[in-house]
Amino acid sequence: MPILRARARPTGAAEKGGALTLASRRARNNGSQSGRRLCVAFLTVTSVPALGQASALDPAGAEASSIATLFWAMVVGGALLWLFVVSLMLYGIRRRRRVHDEWTAGRLIFWAGAVFPVVTLFLLLGYALWLMPQLRPWAPAQAAATLRIEVEGRQFWWRAVYHRPGDQPVVTANEIRLPVGERVEFTLTSSDVIHSFWIPPLGGKMDMIPGRTNRLSILATKPGTFRGPCAEFCGASHALMAFSAISMEPEAFRSWLAAEAGPARPQPSDGARLFVENGCGACHTIRGTAASGEVGPDLTHVGSRLMIGAGTLPNTEEAIARFIAEPDVVKPGSTMPPFRMLPETEIRAMAAYLKALQ
Amino acid sequence: MSLIPRQIETFWTLFTAPVVWAVHFLVCYVGAAIYCAKQHELGFGFGVVRIGIGAATFAALAIILLAAWLSWRQWGFGAYAPPHDEPTRLDRNLLQGFSTLLLSGLSFVAVIYVAMPALFVTECLR
């Protein structure tokens, strides 16, 4: 397939996605060779940082830093306990040992075996419980005045709706932006299976359960781009279900949200016509055009997102063309049918049209 | 006539403290869950639930302390040293007293741990 051959030589901006494409192609051509498979896995992993940093130990949010502090307290506490137990063991197996009387042994068991664990567990439990209300701090009255982002997990992408106080909701997909220094409430749902929403550097992890609305509160403290993976196995493309979370200065965030709320301003082109003619609008919405489907991700401003395919490919015309041609290969198990039967020129025209939707 | 129960010889007193622990656990968790599910139909705030948990905790700790004292008495107030493994009536009695005392200690700590979330959680969180 010409599109694929063109993609096999990674160049310029498409380099990271190019590596991924190359690897997937190799996997299909030499599926039986486990070395190739390893190569695929490696390249897939190395292509991930394009979405942003993903370490819970490098926090950029209030909740994430209290979780990181809790983690380090546990690690240090665990290390001290380990040293204590190992030194007791060394004492017990030393070369010139003498037998303690029963009273001393009993006291050791009482203090080190009963009192010490009780006090240690009391402190650790108290610390973790003391953190709990801080990790989920909101009152119903306060929630009405703040930005609420509704995120719905679907196999294998994220639908995001920004509910601004006293304004129309803004629908987008696969990218979450939030203002630095302002608390944001997330309401998390799922329409198929259990997913899990997690932006490690910003806050805690919360499951998205069908038939239930879970809530999560996040206060970003630093601007940055972070990777949010789906943290609950949800099917064949679970590992390819991610989003980029971008924390921005409040003014920049507000102007971005205002732009995102507006309709697409497409130039009349072959791509725009073909998008509708080929039926893409039955599943995808591009506000301001005839496309108004609700099945797949909203594509109104898809050209401005960091990645496409829910964190799977870089946002380039090449990658969009590839996704249109073979979503079944890029994301196994996804509901989008492949369009590889279309002429390459049509696919390229649609990709150019989508990339221009900034 | 004394308020303190007479010493009786039965296997069942062994379970007093763990049963109090289990009942206290259910009262706290089931009570809080029911309150949070029906809080709009009930006319009081979460503070009442916390006070209730506090009261249940003090009651549970008091019963466990009483059970501990009774078992301490059964153990002869520590006059005999373990392991109480002779096949005699006295040793059987002492072993049961000592075991009950240890179980009371465990249950006492566990009841405190069960009640601790109520110190920090101030509303129904979902």
Image (cartoon, helix red, strand yellow):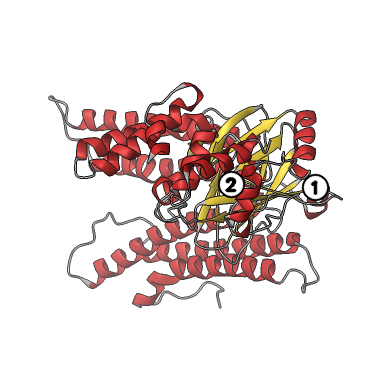
Instruction: Output the chain of dot 2.
Output: A
Q: Position of residue A218 (x, y in %)?
A: 66, 41
Q: Is residue A90 left or right of residue A118?
A: left
Q: Position of residue A298 (x, y in %)?
A: 64, 50
Q: Position of residue A208 (x, y in %)?
A: 56, 56
Q: Position of residue A100 (x, y in %)?
A: 21, 36
Nearest to the observer: residue B69 or residue A75 = A75
On-image quarter of the C terminus of chain A: top right
Q: Nearer the viewer, mark 2 or mark 1?
A: 1
Q: Is residue B19 left or right of residue B42?
A: left
Give the labeled residue for mark 2: A129
Give the labeled residue for mark 1: A164
Helix, strand or loop status at disc 2: helix
- C-alpha span from label 2 to label 1: 32 Å
Nearest to the observer: residue B32 or residue A269 = A269
Q: Are marks 2 and 1 on the same chain?
A: yes
Nearest to the observer: residue A77 or residue B77 = A77
Query: Is residue A309 in sight in this rendering?
Result: no
Which residue occupies 44% across, 32% down? A17
Label 1 packing within 10 angstroms: few (<14), some (14-19), many (20+) = some
Would you place residue B57 above or below residue A286 in this image?
Answer: below
Label 2 packing within 10 angstroms: few (<14), some (14-19), many (20+) = some
Nearest to the observer: residue A329 or residue A128 = A329
Q: At label 1, which amino acid type do we have?
A: Arg
Which residue occupies 38% across, 64% down? B100
On-image quarter of the N terminus of chain A: top left
Would you place residue B64 above or below residue A72 in this image?
Answer: below
Would you place residue A146 above or below residue B24 in this image?
Answer: above
